[in-house]
Image (spheres, helix red, strand yellow):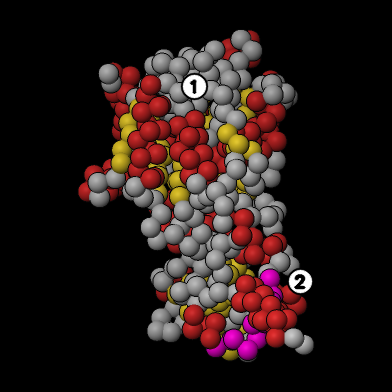
Amino acid sequence: MSSTTISSIKKQYRLFRPIATSNSIASHNSQKHTRYYGFIPEPAIENFFTGRIWSRRNTPFPQAKIENYIRRGYFEITPAVITNPKLKCRRCLNEQRQKFISFYCAKCQKTCHYCRHCITMGRMCSCDELIIWKNEQPRSRSQKSRVEFTWTGKLTAHQQKAADELLTSLKQNRNHLIHAVCGAGKTEILFSPIYASLKAGKRVCVATPRTDVVLELYPRFQQVFQNITIHALYGGAQNDTQFAQLILATTHQLYRFENAFDVMIVDEADAFPYTYDEALQRAVMKAKKADAPIAFVTATPSTKLLIQQRNEKWGYSFIARRFHGNLLPVPRYQALWNYEKAFHKQKIPQKFKNWLEQRLQNHQPFLIFFPTIELMEQATPLFQQIEPTIESVHSEDPDRKEKVLQLRNEERKGLLTTTILERGITIKNVQVAVVGAENPVFTSSALIQISGRVGRNVQYPTGDIVFFHHGITMEMDQARKKILEMNDYE
């Protein structure tokens, strides 16, 4: 073989040799004999695992292929539950001892531990392993994205100001809070800042605590951002091995990401369970890159979030008007004494029945919110006797996506629901009633969000929102007061 040929081969080896990142040099050196020169990772594997922390034994790829990549040193391996010096879940970062279960494991024949906190994502024990892709981002990230921006709408002056402020914060890697009333057009405000980030080759995540919000946003983002891959991740969603530059996900799905996103947007940042679950808040921090900014978007920011914004000098945008310029519908109170007893006796309270019949007579779609699944299921057959197309939905209902779509397409007259539909849903000309508004499940922020379902459409900017109650609570009064304050804001 000539010296020229040898020199050419060495040059090719240098070109294709995988380069260790700064946090994987030690691992690369220890495995340099099993990482072959000239080996190029399959795009599907590289694209899927980039930014993810995943179970070693449960991937969308053949196990033999995964083990081959591990031998070559492309993955960092970590126990799913770290046991020394104390128990820590590597996936959700939980360290609370009471949230771990210890048991004798038939697999490793030792005392094992698993984390109860993130068990809904699949049980992972201390003898299980997670894998993390160690290479740089996929080669598709090496050039700026050619994303097509096809939105032809026009922002109001208030929306444009908020969009410009958010874009400035993202460029400065500064956190930002968008505080805008229900129906202000918060999603439209996000379009141009997200487009600028995608065009710059950045990876963006829009996370939200509710599956229904992901399902609502996904088709809208697909229509606006074309020529790129977008994933919608929620419980039960299928795994897609393509690299997604834009990901819409429930906050629970972020347990499976680490150091993945250049921009993180948390929509409905006040929603349960995100505001009450520190592990979900840690998941957001873990999923983004260390210097990546977070944008929080909500109509009802918590006091804690507002204080944090002020103390840490985040960017801030405030919008007190809906995009169509009309005032927010103000909830009215309607006493409904002993409504639970009435439903137990298989009767719809007369005042409530009158409201329902008025909606049907006016051909107006409606949402009726119940405090518990039990009460709602008792009421459902009573409503169906009046109108057969009425159905109920709750968080465990596998058909709720289809039922909401049927309501939107006017195939159903109305839906009975729990607070699962308090946000992230827009139905033209919808009218809303809350049964048992005094129940503790209906916090002031929940009641504001529920009220915000009414009057969102420019053709139907008004509507009825009624709180049927067995006694007025402070939460009800606070919700009504805040809505009136927004309407008075200049």
Depth order, front residue of 93/359: 93
Q: Which residues make up the magenta segment?
A: 30-40
**Mark linked to residue 154:** 1
Residue at the spot 43% in from the left edge and 36% down from the top edge: 446
Kind of element beneath mark 2: loop
Determine which residue is flagged by label 2.
Answer: 62
Q: Is residue 32 magenta?
A: yes
- Does residue 399 appear in this view? yes
Q: Looking at the rendering, which quadrant does residue 71 occupy?
A: bottom right
Around disc 1, counting alpha carbons within 10 Å, would you say few (fewer than 14), some (14 to 19), or many (20 or more)?
Answer: few
Q: Nearer the viewer, residue 56 or 435?
A: 56
Instruction: Give the position of the N terminus as an image quadrant.
Output: bottom right
Magenta stretch encompasses residue 14: no
- The chief SS type of the magenta part is loop
- The part of the image, by quadrant, that contains residue 41 is bottom right
Q: Nearer the viewer, mark 2 or mark 1?
A: 1
Between residue 376 and residue 232, name the one nearer to us: 232
Whole-number angstrom distance, CA of label 2 to CA of label 1 = 48 Å
